[in-house]
Image: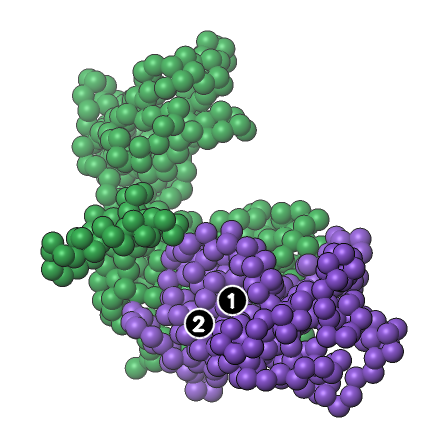
Amino acid sequence: MSELAIRVENISKQYRIGLAQERPDTLRDLLTMGFRRFKHKLSRKGSGRYDDPGHIWALKDVSFEVERGQVLGIVGRNGAGKSTLLKILSRVTDPTEGYGEIHGRVGSLLEVGTGFHPELSGRENIYLNGAILGMRREEINRKFDEIVEFSEVGKFIDTPVKRFSSGMYLRLAFAVAAHLEPEILVVDEVLAVGDAEFQRKCLGKMNDVAQEGRTVLFVSHNMSAILRLTQETIVLDQGKIVLRAPTPEAVDHYLNMGLTKQGERFWTEEELGGKSDAFKPAALRVLNTGGKVVDTVNAAEGFSVEFEYQLTEAISGLRVGLYMMTTRGEYVFTTFDTDDPELYQEYSLRPAGYYMSKCHIPPNLMNEGRFILGLNASVYRIRRYFQEDKALTFTVDATGAPGTHWPEQRLGPVRPQFDWYIEHKEK
Amino acid sequence: MENSHQQGKQSPIIYLRPSKGWLSIDFKELWRYRELIFFLTWRDIKVRYKQAVLGISWAVLQPLLTTLIFTVIFGILLKTPSQDLPYPLFSMSALLPWQLFSTALQRSSVSLVGNANLLTKIYFPRLAIPLSSVFAALVDFAVSFVVLLLVMAYYQYWPGWNILWLIPIVLLALLTALAVGLWLSALNVQYRDIQHMVPFLIQVWMYASPIVYPIETIPEGIWRSLYGLNPMVGVIQGFRWALLGGTPPDITMLISIIVVVVLLISGLYYFRRMEKTFADVV
């Protein structure tokens, strides 16, 4: 039986989200609120603390165990409670309810470069950051050269880090953190930054950590990293664990989660958070050749994707992008509604109003399977108005697609009809 | 799982529970984190004088310039009595412990908010933050203390063995700053009003301490005892006496100590009670 590294039981965390006027951020508010509370208490016995509409449960009754040496992935959408969970596990904040125990020193990489001071030199920051992360001075001395080498900032080590490029800064920050040697390492999204080369290096380092038999909790939106590094994954949604399964299964579940199955998707005002943004998505649908909204389209016939949105003010240079992704998280293609130079000219300025951008996906392009549509509305290099990586999923049925006379699965997300030429020469 | 035993040493078990009520102070843990306190202190000092042309000489200039201003206004123009000491010496010997206190208080009261990024990301004993702000003030104090000794030499005042009393007196000043700093820093996490209030508090507090005027100005008896509720009265009076002689600390010192102990213990407990919410509200 393996040893236990982490055990949590029914951990819950409540946050005040604050109906603005209910939050006493200044003394004056506190005084007026105190008076109201007092009146409230007089009129109603007992505290309604937990049912208060100004409170939300960021985590609710989360229980799980992690064995020593296990690398556990945690996935979930923004706001699913991942960060809260990690904060509780790294003791940054307390659970509101529940119990947990952690066997061993926890090192958290909730954000690289925490505690870096721009005015201090690289060398000074290594010591400062190391101490903040819980390293002893003697330990830092010992690993100093290794850290510098890993970070590749060598000759700039005595330069204030404010003069560092962002890449150098990140490398140094990660290098310090990566040389922590806790029994349990909690990693949140650190790989979302840096160039590809550096990310590879980070992943390699994380792999080493896992190989050494340390326990790692790994949170990421990067499914391929999750798939590579972890064997088992927890899927969080709305503060609850919805699934704990071998990673491939959990990733599939996560990518399919909470998506409508009807081939159509609407955005409500609440969902948009009441933001008064210039770009407001309204609806996204998948249509078959007959113009019907469907969940399953036929690959041999082709289909279209329709996106309705509203501009509350004129935007110049806007482009609406569509991403097609497999449920494994690999991109199939990216296309923009103004890819065509003529359309690009015509819609260089889009006045306020309602719009629909429609994309025809030609016959014999997609392979069978389930796919995810992502959306993006942006002005190139200026501003991103809207982005949703998993706006809608739908199924592609391959009936009648090229080669279906052999009833076997084809590799790859696309299944185009290519022109073949077969030559035969008589001897 | 062979390598799971690689660690060998017994690993500590950390318990996660909702915090309720008043927590005790884990001095052992604080001691384990002493290097962090050292590095935070060091960072405070280092950063304070970065990109300042005069650098650490500000620690010399500040008390000197203030002494000059006080001497002109209170010593020369208003002819404030000064316990038969040269007025510059009289005011500077009070300014030093005062500036130690006010710097420590000012910095510690905003320290938690200033380190919000640490609070929300990493666990460590939260006390390390206000503590290191208080310690950082000591460095300035040490520098300006040398200047004070030089000024004393100029006026041909030589300290006697009483100078040893400075150690407990400086400690008392630090504890006073820490006690109030704990209260204010924890309050400031939720109520940013505090950071607007602190400068006024310090200003009022300064005039409520015998810096520009001698303690004899306050009538003896009940008034003097009430005056002693301000712990800085005992500190300043004691500091002056230990260096320059004159009125030795009396009953006011005792009152000061009691006040500081009460403030410190209550401050520690308030801080400990609030610290679990720092990461959520800061």
Residue picked out by circle 1: B181
Residue at the spot 68% in from the left edge and 59% down from the top edge:
B47
Q: Looking at the picture, how far across and down is residue A164, in whole percent?
A: 68, 50
CA–CA distance in space, label 2 to label 1 = 8 Å
Using residue A8 as the reference point, say whether residue A377 is left or right of it.
right
Chain under disc 2 = B
Q: Which chain is green?
A: A
Residue at the spot 86% in from the left edge and 74% down from the top edge:
B155
The image shows residue A391, relative to residue B215, as above or below, that is above
Are the residues under badges 2 and 1 in a single subunit? yes
Query: Does any portion of residue A300 appear in the rendered image?
Result: no
Q: Nearer the viewer, residue A331 or B129?
A: B129
* Callout 1: SS: helix
Using residue B154 as the reference point, say whether residue A223 is left or right of it.
left
The image shows residue A263, relative to residue B210, as above or below, that is above
Amino acid marked by disc 2? Gly
Q: Colour of chain B?
A: purple
Residue at the spot 70% in from the left edge and 77% down from the top edge:
B240
Chosen colour scheme: by chain
